[in-house]
Amino acid sequence: MADTWEQLERECNGCRVCPLGERRQHLVFGDGARDAEIMFIGEGPGQREDEQGVPFVGPAGQLLNEMMEIIGLDRSKVYIANIVKCRPPGNRDPAHEEQLACLPWLRRQTALLRPKMIVCLGRIAAQVVIKPDFRITREHGQWTQKAGVWLTAIYHPSALLRDVSKRPETFVDLKAIQAKARELCTRTDLSTP
Ligand code: URA
């Protein structure tokens, strides 16, 4: 039988395929519109996300909100998920095995959502979703199509917090995302104030 969002989230909440599930406070399943045309994919929950069970609610999330605002988006119009749904301890990168163990959940979320475009936030998401040897410094802002879905990657908001010199390039990438969304997304309002 086909998934429903409620059933998928419930099943995901019971997942103990990798050890991250044992140590988390909350599952961070996803946030936003479950019929969104645009999906953002990050890496994995940090401390604040683990506490609240919602992706991108810490400092990186604040910046992500501002980045979306620049192109007339907010969280209610998109869907936000992560490669791994449980917090890796100490904010380390999710291990390759953890990413692989969690990937079926993301696949099922994507199958339910059927987005027109996916924006990967940072290298890890880009390497899982776009291609394993994705180089974020060289390939951010480029577009490719897989199974009818347009894919791109931009710097992770945490990287932009650490290194403000990357922000002008990201502004260009965001404007390209806005243009692509205007071309592809018929139900998403992208009007900027
Ligand atoms: N960084 C991520 O990649 N995801 C979150 O949910 C928060 C920070």
Image: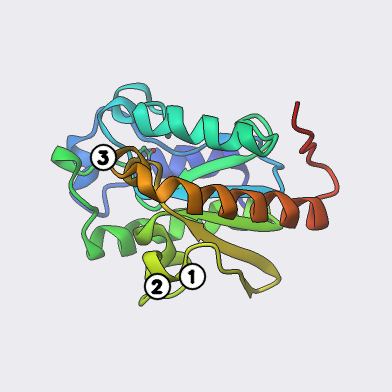
Observer able to see residue 2: no
Give the alpha-carbon distance from disc 3 to disc 2, as whole Å.
Answer: 23 Å
Callout 1 amino acid: Ile
Which residue is found at the position 83% from the left and 43% from the top?
Answer: 187
Above-or-below relation of 177 to 134: above
Q: Find disc 1 in the rendering and name its residue.
A: 130
Tag 1 secondary structure = loop
Above-or-below relation of 179 to 28: below
Q: Looking at this view, name the residue that lies furthest to the left.
A: 90
Q: Residues within 10 Å of mark 3 (few under 14, many from 20)?
A: many
Residue 14, image x, y percentages: 35, 41
Q: Find disc 3 in the rendering and name its residue.
A: 87
Callout 3 amino acid: Arg
Callout 2 amino acid: Phe
Q: Quadrant location of the C terminus?
A: top right
Q: Find disc 2 in the rendering and name its residue.
A: 134
Q: Residues within 10 Å of mark 2 (few under 14, many from 20)?
A: some
Q: Are marks 1 and 2 in contact (CB under 8 Å)?
A: yes
Q: Quadrant location of the N terminus?
A: bottom right
Dividing the image into four quarters, tell me where ligand 1 lies.
top left
Above-or-below relation of 21 to 152: above
**Disc 1 vs disc 2: which is toward the camera?**
2
Which residue is found at the position 82% from the left and 57% from the top?
Answer: 183
Give the alpha-carbon distance from disc 1 to disc 2, as whole Å.
Answer: 7 Å
